[in-house]
């Protein structure tokens, strides 16, 4: 009976350790918390861009990974590309902005 309890405790510990390691961040993967934070940042950047009348939000794509925001898509002028980058930088939690917007 004692041996059975030890085996069960060992299996439960192994299961818990595996579960916690599955939620940990690595170089190439975000943790669950980082993913949620990045989703929030992406939403805030999209909202900021949507609030700017000169920018066409449907032509701008926003991706966030570990606080780094990447803007891609098309804008009408270099001034609009610069404005979108400034709006993205103004959002809390953004560590860097990669502005890959193309002027058409």
Image (spheres, grey):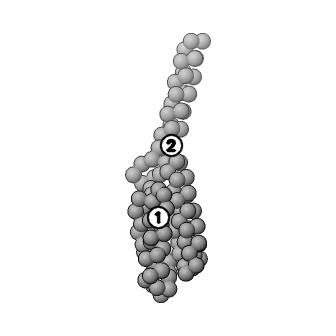
Find residue 3 and report its horizontal and vertical position in percent. 55, 14
Find residue 94 and report its horizontal and vertical position in percent. 45, 59
Rendered residue at 49%/51% (across/down): 34
Instruction: Find out whether the residues at labels 2 and 1 contact each other: C-beta distance under 8 Å.
Output: no
Q: Residues within 10 Å of mark 1 (few under 14, many from 20)?
A: few
Determine whether 25 is above or below 98 in the image.
above
Compare marks 2 and 1 and give the one earlier in the sequence: 2
Residue 101 in sight:
no
Dot label at residue 60: none
Find residue 75 and report its horizontal and vertical position in percent. 50, 82
Q: Separation of disc 2 and disc 1 at Cα? A: 33 Å
Helix or strand or loop: what does disc 2 sit on?
helix
Rendered residue at 56%/27% (across/down): 12
Can you say which quadrant of the picture contains the N terminus? top right
Depth order, front residue of 95/63: 95
Mark 2, residue position: 22
Determine whether 22 is above or below 44 in the image.
above
Determine whether 98 is above or below 26 in the image.
below
Depth order, front residue of 92/100: 92
The number of numbered discs placed on residues in the rendered structure image is: 2
Q: Residues within 10 Å of mark 2 (few under 14, many from 20)?
A: few
Rendered residue at 53%/18% (across/down): 6
Helix or strand or loop: what does disc 1 sit on?
loop
Query: On the rendered structure, is 27 left or right of 4?
Result: left
Find residue 68 and report its horizontal and vertical position in percent. 43, 61
Residue furthest to the bottom in view is: 104
Mark 1, residue position: 90
Residue 17 in sight:
yes
Mark toward the viewer: 2 or 1 = 1
Determine whether 27 is above or below 13 in the image.
below
Rendered residue at 42%/48% (across/down): 26
């Amino acid at each position: 009976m004692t041996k059975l309890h030890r085996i069960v405790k060992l299996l439960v510990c192994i299961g818990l350790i595996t579960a916690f390691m599955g939620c940990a961040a690595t170089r190439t993967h975000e943790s669950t918390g980082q993913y949620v934070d990045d989703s929030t940042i992406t939403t805030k950047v999209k909202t900021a861009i949507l609030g700017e009348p000169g920018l066409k939000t449907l032509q701008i794509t926003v991706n966030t990974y570990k606080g780094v925001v990447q803007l891609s898509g098309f804008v009408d002028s270099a001034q609009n590309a610069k404005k979108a980058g400034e709006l993205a930088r103004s959002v809390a939690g953004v560590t860097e902005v990669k502005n890959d917007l193309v002027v058409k």
